[in-house]
Image: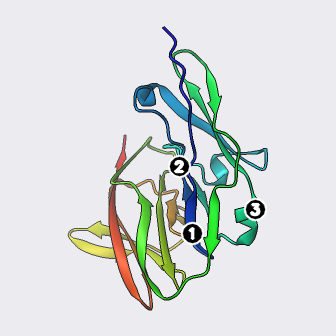
Amino acid sequence: IRRRYDVKVYEEFVIKGNTAVLRCHIPEYVREFVTVTAWQVDEANLTVENDLFPTGELHIRKVDAADAMSRYQCQTQHRLTGETVSSPSSRKLTVRESFAMSPRIVDSRRQVRADKGLSAELPCAAQGEPVPVYQWFRKVRGQAVPLLPGPRLLQLDGTLVAVTDAGLYTCFVNNTSGSDTVDTELQVS
């Protein structure tokens, strides 16, 4: 029996210069069967390279007033029926200036799984004013070792990309008003 479902994208408030996180809200009764397959911005398709995470979130980096003028829409597909459902297209970002504010991490994962030999993305997005600075660490024998960009490692604002070593990673964000941290376990199989 087919049961119709609708998906929605709710309005997000973001401080200028920070990373906005848009989520495609899928009803609980079909969530295990539905995958976010794409995001559209002003009717143009975005792909994984444009910060669409496997879990369906869209990260929009270094947000400015132009991002608030765009229309955002998520597209989903039901794995059993093949049905494709899109959210209504509308303006979903409110970009604002802010006063000094300690950073707060607004998107991350406790655990990320990756296939051996393939790159993984460990999301970390924070809001703060001034715009937070991101730094990643890997726990090695109980010590936090700073990660430096190189051929196997790329950092896009807060998101760590191309990590292939299993272990515990820490995203540390700070600005002149404070700091925040989150740990992510990377499992490689």
Q: Position of residue 14 (x, y in %)?
A: 57, 69
Task: Identify the residue shown where x is 49% and y is 62%.
Answer: 160
User: Residue 84: which numbered mark, if any?
Assistant: none
Q: Does residue 49 appear to the left or right of 115 in the view shown?
A: right
Q: Nearer the viewer, mark 3 or mark 2?
A: 3
Q: Amino acid at mark 2?
A: Arg
* Residue at the (56%, 60%) spot, across then down: 12
Determine the CA span between mark 2 and mark 1: 14 Å
Asked if residue 19 shows in the view, the reply is no
Using residue 100 as the reference point, say whether residue 45 is left or right of it.
right
> Which image quarter is the C terminus in?
top left
Q: Classify mark 3: residues with Cα within 10 Å, few (<14), some (14-19) or many (20+).
A: some
Give the percent coordinates (x, y) of residue 110. 33, 54
Which kind of residue does numbered mark 3 sit on?
Met
Residue in the image at 50% along x and 68% along y:
158
Q: Position of residue 138 (x, y in %)?
A: 34, 68
- Residue 54 seen in the current view: yes
The residue under label 1 is 14
Q: Along the line of sight, which residue is nearer the eye, 21 or 28?
A: 28
In the picture of the structure, the residue carrying the numbered disc 2 is 23
Q: Position of residue 107 (x, y in %)?
A: 44, 60
Q: CA distance from mark 1 to mark 3?
A: 13 Å
User: Image quadrant of residue 60?
Assistant: bottom right
Pointer 3 or 2: first along the chain = 2
Question: How many residues crowd mark 2 within 10 Å: few (<14), some (14–19), many (20+)?
Answer: some
